Image (spheres, grey):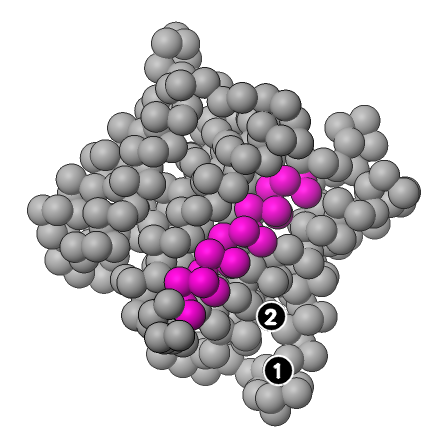
Amino acid sequence: MTKETRAALLMTAAAFFLSLVPLAVKLVPVDSGIPTSEKLVARGLVAAVFTFILLKKRKESLVSARPWLLFLRSALGTIGMVLYFTALEKLPLADTVTINKLSPFFVLLFSWLFLKEKLKRIQIIAIFIAFSGVALVAHPDEMSISNAVIFALASAVFAGAAYTTLRALRKYDSPLRVVFWFSLFSVVAFLPKTISGGVMPTGTTILPLLGIGIAGVLGQVLMTAAYRYAPGGKVAVYGYLSVVFSVIWQISVFGNIPSIMVLTGALLVMTGGWINYRYR
């Protein structure tokens, strides 16, 4: 097995597990009373414990070489997760995941604006195709865009901003350290609210809450491993398979078949992603 094949398989597995995160969020019963903050704490706590164990096992330092940059990445990523989880509570699974997949295109725009990186003509075309796909998913036949769609779009913006900081942060901190502090940041930020206004998990909610954390950290670890075997441009496109998985979950778990417009929009977003990573 070549390194590129192994990287592709690892990224496909990462996309699978990362697609389980929004599924687990949707599986938390609406009438359970569990707030978004508690879901974020569940995700962050599992990831923080797991990465802390790995860091100690590898004898890596917890101290960041660029703490202010790591703080910025953690803050932007946490805001993006809040918006993403909020959108998931209001929109169908496939719609939310597809809109959130605009984040790599916001990375292109932010890198062009703030890091002075050149934007190729083919990438501009890819951005246009992807945003056209999201326009279909957002249901242009409606007179106004719902708040849920705005939350999903904003989650992609903040995720893109967080990923942009990683372009500089990767020179100073390991992926494990970044994931640890990002996860710990979300726990510290929302633990007080969870304690004061949270709900004690029961049999119907504890498994989805654990699933949010376990699936999230497995997806992050597998993604990190994939980038070790091949350049990002050759494997990142497989991350868009999470859109395909989300469509499968929406049909098989919730019995909700996405409309033709949503499926077309998802295909356009994935096409834009493929063009971007193929010709970047």
Tell me whether circle 2 and circle 1 mark residues in contact (CB < 8 Å): yes
Most extreme residue toward the front is 1
Q: Is residue 31 left or right of residue 12?
A: right
Q: Residues within 10 Å of mark 1 (few under 14, many from 20)?
A: some
Q: Is residue 189 left or right of residue 202?
A: left
Give neighbour class at mark 2: few <14, some 14-19, many 20+ (Cα, 10 Å): many
- In this view, 181 is above or below 148: below
Picture residue at 60% right of the left edge, 88% below the top: 58
Residue that appears at 49% across and 22% down: 258
Question: Residue 55's mark?
Answer: 1
Q: Earlier in the sequence, mark 2 or mark 1?
A: 1
> Foreground residue, 39 or 19?
19
SS state under label 2: helix
- Where does the magenta region start and end? 6-25
SS of the residue at dot 1? helix
Q: Is residue 269 magenta?
A: no
Residue 47, percent from left and from top: 66, 64
The residue that mark 2 highlights is: 180
The quarter in which the C terminus is drawn is bottom left
Question: Is residue 231 among what the camera can see?
Answer: yes
Q: Which residue sits at x=51%, y=33%?
A: 247
Verify whether residue 20 appears in magenta: yes
Image x and y of residue 97, in percent: 49, 38
Q: Quadrant of residue 118?
A: bottom left
Please determine whether, in this image, residue 51 is positioned above or below residue 63: above
| Residue 140, quarter of the rendered image | top left
Q: Quadrant of residue 254?
A: top right
Q: Amino acid at mark 2?
A: Phe
Q: Amino acid at mark 1?
A: Leu
Our reading of the magenta stretch's main secondary structure is helix
Residue 83 in view (yes/no): no
